[in-house]
Image (tube, rainbow, N blue to C red):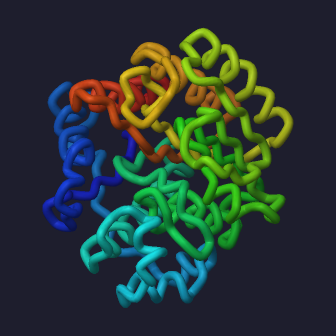
């Protein structure tokens, strides 16, 4: 069994104009069920998160401004979504999906969040469609409850995990790694524990060569007892917001390298899906589904 957090859009709808490509949150579970990669028993729908877990990462003022819809206009514009109670509730549930998922990963070795990967959310503000940093909240939870002592956050989305880097800047128990497009958003990068900035047009061979060397080296060096993996598929050449030139097969190979190393070293891994903005929704779904397919082949 591979636990998967699922967040029905119809219960907490996204703002008008943002359905595509966000309809992947509905279509991806359907595809996984249709092809037999997942069963209904794999999915769980999280409730809203305990707010005390959120304020271990985000400031109380920022959280209260979200809950009361009192963010100033400039801060709201940085997020990119029209702020609403429904949107905030959706983000609270997404964060809880990752938190519950990391606990399930301790039992099942791997767990997924269909959404999540909100790595542009900082301690005191959100940006680029990210309100709350789901993997940061869950990582802090594991540390607070002594469920992990050394955490690796492996961000392989095309955009740098700037919020995650800022949140854990002074936390030696969390090692943040971001492999991203050099000229992609954010244009002002934060400093992760390790940043690898890729040139525009980077292809499968170069990308995979880096990842294949990097992952085992990181594990040997850091010796993490838990890994958070942000598996964005905006590394594809077809992605509208990315500038790399990876293929579906290259993205799949990336996932295989990550999961094989997690299994080899017996490290539980929680996976948030992150970005994916190709022109064709079929390409987005296939790329994300590959991550689940690979995990199932390796862990079951």
Q: Position of residue 44 (x, y in %)?
A: 30, 56
Q: In which quarter of the image is the C terminus?
A: top left
Instruction: Decide: is 244 above or below 21.
Output: above
Q: Quadrant of residue 177?
A: top right
Q: In which quarter of the image is residue 197?
A: top right
Name the residue located 70 percent from the left edge and 62 percent from the top edge: 166
| Viewer-proximal residue among 290 and 197 | 197
Q: Is residue 228 rendered to the left or right of residue 64? A: right
- Residue furthest to the top in view is 205
Q: How many labels does the image show?
A: 0
Instruction: Decide: is 94 above or below 69.
Output: above
Q: Is residue 127 rendered to the left or right of residue 31? A: right
| Viewer-proximal residue among 42 and 5 | 5
Name the residue located 43 percent from the left edge and 20 percent from the top edge: 237
Q: Position of residue 115 (x, y in %)?
A: 37, 51
Q: In which quarter of the image is the N terminus?
A: top left
Instruction: Decide: is 238 above or below 71.
Output: above
Name the residue located 28 percent from the left edge and 80 percent from the top edge: 85
Q: Quadrant of residue 185?
A: top right
């Amino acid at each position: 069994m591979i636990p998967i957090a699922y967040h029905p859009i119809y219960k907490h709808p996204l703002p008008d104009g943002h359905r595509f490509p966000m309809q992947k949150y509905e279509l991806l579970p359907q595809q996984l069920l249709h092809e037999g990669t997942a069963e209904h028993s794999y999915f769980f729908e999280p409730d809203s998160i305990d707010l005390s877990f959120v304020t271990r990462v985000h400031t109380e003022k920022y959280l209260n401004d979200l809950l009361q819809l009192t963010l100033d206009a400039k801060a709201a514009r940085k997020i990119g979504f029209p702020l609403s109670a429904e949107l905030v509730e959706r983000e609270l549930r997404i964060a809880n999906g990752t938190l519950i998922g990391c606990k399930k990963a301790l039992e099942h070795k791997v767990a997924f969040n269909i959404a999540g990967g909100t790595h542009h959310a900082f301690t005191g503000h959100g940006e680029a469609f990210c309100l709350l940093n789901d993997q940061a909240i869950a990582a802090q939870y594991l540390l607070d409850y002594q469920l992990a002592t050394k955490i690796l956050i492996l961000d392989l989305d095309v955009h740098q995990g700037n919020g995650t880097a800022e949140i854990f800047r002074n936390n030696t128990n969390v090692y943040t790694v971001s492999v991203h497009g050099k000229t992609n958003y954010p244009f002002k990068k934060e400093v992760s524990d390790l940043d690898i900035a890729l040139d525009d047009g980077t292809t499968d061979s170069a990308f995979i060569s880096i990842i294949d060397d990097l992952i085992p080296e990181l594990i040997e060096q850091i010796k993490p007892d838990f890994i958070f993996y942000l598996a964005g598929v905006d590394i594809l050449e077809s992605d509208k917001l990315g500038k790399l030139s990876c293929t579906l097969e290259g993205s799949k190979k990336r996932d295989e390298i990550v999961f094989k190393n997690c299994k080899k070293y017996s490290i539980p891994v929680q996976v948030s899906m992150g970005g994916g903005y190709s022109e064709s929704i079929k390409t987005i779904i296939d790329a994300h589904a590959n991550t689940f397919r690979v995990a199932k082949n390796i862990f079951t």
